[in-house]
Image (cartoon, grey):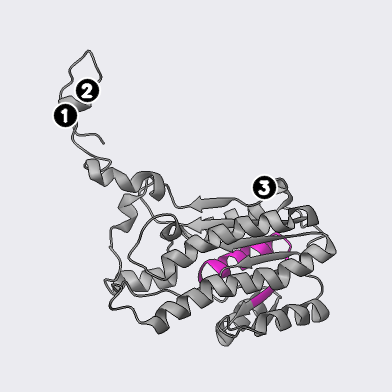
Amino acid sequence: MRHDSKKPTLAITGAASGIGEACARLAYEQGWRIVILDRDVEAGQKVANELSGVFYELDLLRVDELRTLAARIDTEIGPVYGVINSAGISQPTDSPDELSLETWDAVQQTHLRGMYLSCAAFGTAMAKRGGGTIVNISSVAGMRSAPLYSYAPAKAAIISLTACLAAEWGRDGVRVNCVSPGFTRTARVERRLKLGERDPHVYSNSAMGRMVEPDEVADACLFLLSDAASAITGVNLPVDCGWLVSSSWDNFGGRHRVATKTDAPAGGDRTATQHS
């Protein structure tokens, strides 16, 4: 895809690994100049070097750092016209009486407050220049209940925040959208599967019967950044292999349920068969 010269630089938080890294690699292939923002200095610098990009250390728990860093990037690299907010941390599936307030706060601060600060810093500058695009990474956990008492509410709030900012900056030429991945085959998820912290058959609940690949999330993000999405703002796009539409089917025996007479159309019988 041709790179839009009006948006030469793309800043990505959390791009040292996972979905953020996949976004950086795809964006580089599509002609963007990449700025990697991450607290993992070694991994972040490695990705930046491989993509002829620039790395800046960023810890979203440090409140004042982002605004200063955004101004520094503008001075040293040039105006940022694209942002993908992908930085985040996970949390244990502790019950409310087990989950420490320190963990709850850290997850909220990294996901919700950190994303808000990034949007405020970069988005305000975009609005003053008259254009730009932001994509925030949420999660299907923010669209359904989950035993993640800080992560899930933070992700739900990100979806709402995205809509608010889209309305705020729309007439300034800034589009703000959200992508909500389903269970994605990142190194972090693979580790949790090996440790038994996630259901090893989690993919079976999706309509497509598999997990999402990081590159597929990156495809959605880069589409929303592109001119092909020029009339799209304020949306939340699930990229989940159909998990949202299919997961409730377990209540009825799953996708491969055995048909009964109650399944038969009115006016006729049918033999019970195993659907394949």
Magenta segment boundaries in residue numbering: 18-36
Say which residue label 3 marks.
232
Can residue 168 be seen at all in this image of the molecule? Answer: yes
Is label 2 in a helix, a strand or a loop?
Answer: loop
Q: Is residue 264 above or below residue 146?
A: above
Which marked residue is nearer to the observer: mark 2 or mark 3? 3
Q: Is residue 245 above or below residue 25?
A: above
* Tags 3 and 1 touching, CB below 8 Å: no
The answer to which quarter of the image holds residue 130 is: bottom right
88 and 111: which one is in front?
111
148 and 259: which one is in front?
148
Spatial separation of the CA atoms under disc 2 and disc 1: 7 Å
**Which label belongs to residue 264?**
2
Which is the main secondary structure of the residues drawn in magenta?
helix
Q: Please report the residue visible at 59 percent of the width from the left and 70 percent of the height from the top.
A: 115
Question: Residue 97 in the image: x percent, y percent?
Answer: 28, 77
- Residue type pointed to by label 2: Ala
Q: Please report the residue visible at 36 percent of the width from the left and 68 percent of the height from the top.
A: 148
Q: Quarter of the image containing the C terminus? A: top left
Q: Residues within 10 Å of mark 1 (few under 14, many from 20)?
A: few
Q: Residues within 10 Å of mark 3 (few under 14, many from 20)?
A: some
* Tags 2 and 1 touching, CB below 8 Å: yes
The answer to whether residue 241 is left or right of residue 59 is left
Say which residue label 1 marks.
260
Is label 3 in a helix, a strand or a loop?
Answer: loop
- Residue type pointed to by label 1: Thr
* Mark sitting earlier along the chain (3/1): 3
- Asked whether residue 147 is drawn in magenta, I would say no
- Residue type pointed to by label 3: Ile
Q: Please report the residue visible at 52 percent of the width from the left and 55 percent of the height from the top.
A: 216
